[in-house]
Image: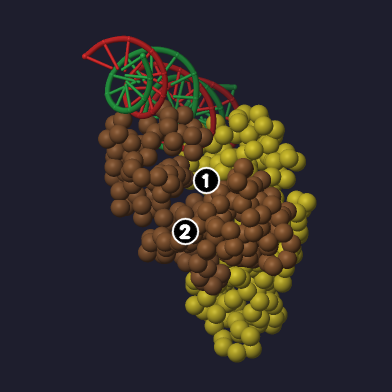
Chain colours: A yellow, B brown, C red, D green
DNA sequence: AAAAATTTTTAGACTAGTCTAAATTTTTAT
DNA sequence: ATAAAAATTTAGACTAGTCTAAAAATTTTT
């Protein structure tokens, strides 16, 4: 059995690994988990003993197969709970993450399986992130950032890179929801902000900061 | 904010208080929480400092108003989750308690409120136990044990006193579900076992052990 | 009203997870 | 190739919650 804390470390190592090539560093983990590097070092020794990570002192860290399996299990639970909170209880996509951070640690194979069925085996969470399979496989998705789309193209909003409530609430306010169609009309050469038309209706300006965090297909 | 452990102690004190008059003893808490008396003593000092219990050394313990408010909050969450697991996910009444023991500690006012609404504001959990109000009031219910019912009376199964999976599975097997009608046909003078007719159909024998743990109206 | 038995509390130790400060290793700059 | 800087690990300490063993208080029995 694994503790909440161990599960959180594994999940964080998984996310950081996905973010860039090579081993994950102690400092990046410390930042991500809002702890100190010393604490991370301790935990890495422990996870290595349990064979959940490959770890050579001072050389960074990588999940073992078993570690990745566990990390994906936690991520699967997190995202399924987010779907439940959003679809069934009516929470906004800016509210679900915090609760899912707790719910993801409820330990029952049966529970997540039944919940998945109840929700109709969703493929994506409310932020457009794919839900790992029960067997522990993360579906690959091929999205582009809105900031990379060329003028004249029409795309659909598929997900977000930034998950903060502030960012999501900003999208809500401007009407940039998941699934909405976006026609890129113009890119400002100076600040790279984008002028877009939403669902063939209203036109609006999107800063590069926002466009970089919007995933489209 | 209060820890899982503190919440569990408060809940347990509440249950033991309800079970018999007077203060709750250290030993009974130790037994109920599957810890040792020494550990309970430590925690009682801590809860007393936080003004959640009235506590005089060697004299047992009683919840303060604030302590009871918190205990009822936890019990409310527990029972609402049990309804969800049973009604929406299709778990049996013998399976829900264990998961609810974890879910009850998810800390979000909003979550339990929305869940309650989603379930249609249920009044009772799958074991027939009443769900405390959001304001922290435990509804009173007037049930009798089946073992107290006199011959010739027809009653309805409203709840259980014993919550173990084994007992509940036994009831499933014999067809004694919540809501079913029970006509007491005969009481054996020797072992106090009861002969009953279920839903005006089949007749069966119920041991006194079982009858004492079945609540009827 | 003592003595015996039981219950409860205290003392001291352990684990998980965290911290700060110091030591060590690796990386970067000169 | 050194020296300086940055990253990482170790040392030692703290908290929450638990334990065993011993001490103290209460209750029961004689
Ligand atoms: Mn999330
Ligand atoms: Mn998400
Ligand atoms: Mn229960
Ligand atoms: Mn119940």
How far across and how far down the image is residue B163, in percent?
58, 49
Tell me if label 1 and label 2 are in contact, CB under 8 Å. no
Mark 2 residue crowding within 10 angstroms, few (<14) / some (14–19) / many (20+): many
Cα gap from disc 1 to disc 2, whole angstroms: 32 Å
What is the x, y in percent for residue B204? 71, 55
Q: Secondary structure at mark 2?
A: helix
Q: How many marks?
A: 2
- Where residue A146 appears, x then y in whole percent? 64, 71
| Chain assignment, label 1 | A
Asked if residue A145 is positioned above or below residue B36 in the image, the reply reads below
Answer with the quarter of the image where residue A50 lies.
top right
Say which residue appears at 68% left-offset and 61% top-offset.
B197
Describe residue A72's horizontal placement relative to residue B106 as left or right. Answer: right
Which mark is drawn over residue A33?
A: 1
Q: Position of residue A52 (x, y in %)?
A: 68, 36
Between A191 and A66, which is closer to the camera in this rendering? A66
Circle 2 residue: B76
- The residue that appears at 60% across and 89% down in the rendered structure is A201
| Residue at 62% across, 43% down | B191
Q: Is residue B37 above or below residue B12?
A: above
Nearer to us in this view, B139 or A199: B139
Regarding residue A126, the answer to whether it shows in the image is yes
């Amino acid at each position: 059995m694994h503790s909440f804390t161990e599960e959180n470390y594994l999940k964080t190592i998984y996310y950081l690994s996905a973010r860039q090539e090579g081993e994950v560093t102690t400092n990046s983990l410390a930042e991500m988990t809002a702890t100190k590097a010393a604490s991370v070092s301790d935990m890495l020794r422990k996870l290595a003993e349990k064979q959940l990570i490959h770890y050579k002192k001072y050389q960074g860290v990588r999940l073992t197969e078993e570690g990745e399996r566990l990390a994906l299990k936690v991520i699967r639970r997190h995202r399924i709970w987010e779907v439940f909170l959003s679809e069934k209880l009516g929470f906004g996509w800016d509210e679900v993450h915090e609760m899912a951070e707790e719910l993801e640690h409820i330990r029952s194979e049966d529970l997540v399986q039944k919940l998945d069925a109840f929700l109709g085996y969703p493929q994506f969470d409310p932020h457009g992130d794919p839900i790992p399979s029960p067997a522990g496989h993360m579906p690959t998705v091929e999205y582009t950032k809105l900031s990379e789309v060329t003028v004249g193209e029409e795309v659909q909003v598929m997900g977000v890179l930034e998950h903060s409530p502030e960012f999501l609430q900003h999208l809500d306010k401007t009407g940039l929801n998941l699934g909405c169609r976006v026609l890129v009309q113009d890119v400002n050469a100076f600040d790279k902000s984008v002028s877009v038309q939403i669902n063939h209706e209203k036109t609006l300006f999107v800063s590069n900061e926002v466009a970089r965090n919007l995933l489209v297909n």
